[in-house]
Image (spheres, rainbow, N blue to C red):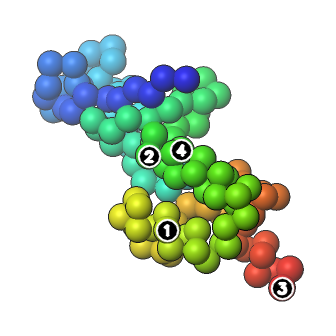
Amino acid sequence: MAAGFISSPGTEYGPCIDACDHHDCGPNRLLAAQGCAVCQEPIGYETMFYQEDNWTVLTHERCSLLVDQAVRMISEGMSHPAMVVQLAKEYELSTEKVRQMLTCENSGLCPVWCPGHEQASA
């Protein structure tokens, strides 16, 4: 699957800066405003992302890579706290943000691992 991006407003391929009636400008603004399925932040402009389910699910490329790396780390037997710390460092995020991104609602890692379920079963 290839990642894509939305050019910044006012650039040659981006939407107009001001509201307009162009066929692509409005939809591109809506896509850029849509939240990433993993981190919940807007997809934004000039940021690589993937789409699924006929453009209803968007995920930043960076977030997708983080989740893939988490799955590999889990399968290699890395402890959950060590994994969260390592991913936070590598992706320059807080450990809290990494924990949020790896919940079942955001990453789809369940039943492999979900901090909420881990605490609930303890």
Q: Quadrant of the N terminus?
A: top right
Type of amino acid under label 1: Gln
The answer for how far apart the CA atoms under marks 1 and 3 are is 23 Å
Residue that numbered label 2 is attached to: 62
Q: In which quarter of the image is the C terminus?
A: bottom right
Q: In this view, does 40 lie to the left or right of 72?
A: left
Residue 119 shows up from this direction: yes
Residue at image point 15% right, 19% down: 12
The nearer-to-camera label among 1 and 2 is 1
Type of amino acid under label 4: Ser
Type of amino acid under label 2: Arg
Q: In this view, does 31 lie to the left or right of 56?
A: left
The nearer-to-camera label among 1 and 3 is 1
Type of amino acid under label 3: Ala
First in sequence, mark 1 or 4: give its number. 4
The nearer-to-camera label among 1 and 4 is 1
The answer for how far apart the CA atoms under marks 4 and 2 are is 5 Å
Q: In the rendered image, which quarter is residue 8 located in? A: top left
Q: Are marks 1 and 3 in contact (CB under 8 Å)?
A: no
Rendered position, 6 above or below 82: above
Residue that numbered label 4 is attached to: 64
Residue 100 x, y percent position in the rendering: 56, 67
First in sequence, mark 2 or 3: give its number. 2
Residue that numbered label 3 is attached to: 122
Mark 3 is surrounded, within 10 Å at the Cα level, by few (under 14), some (14 to 19) or many (20 or more) other residues, namely few
The answer for how far apart the CA atoms under marks 3 and 4 are is 28 Å
What secondary structure is marked by label 4?
helix
Q: Do the residues labelled 4 and 2 touch (CB within 8 Å)?
A: yes
Residue at image point 58% right, 74% down: 82
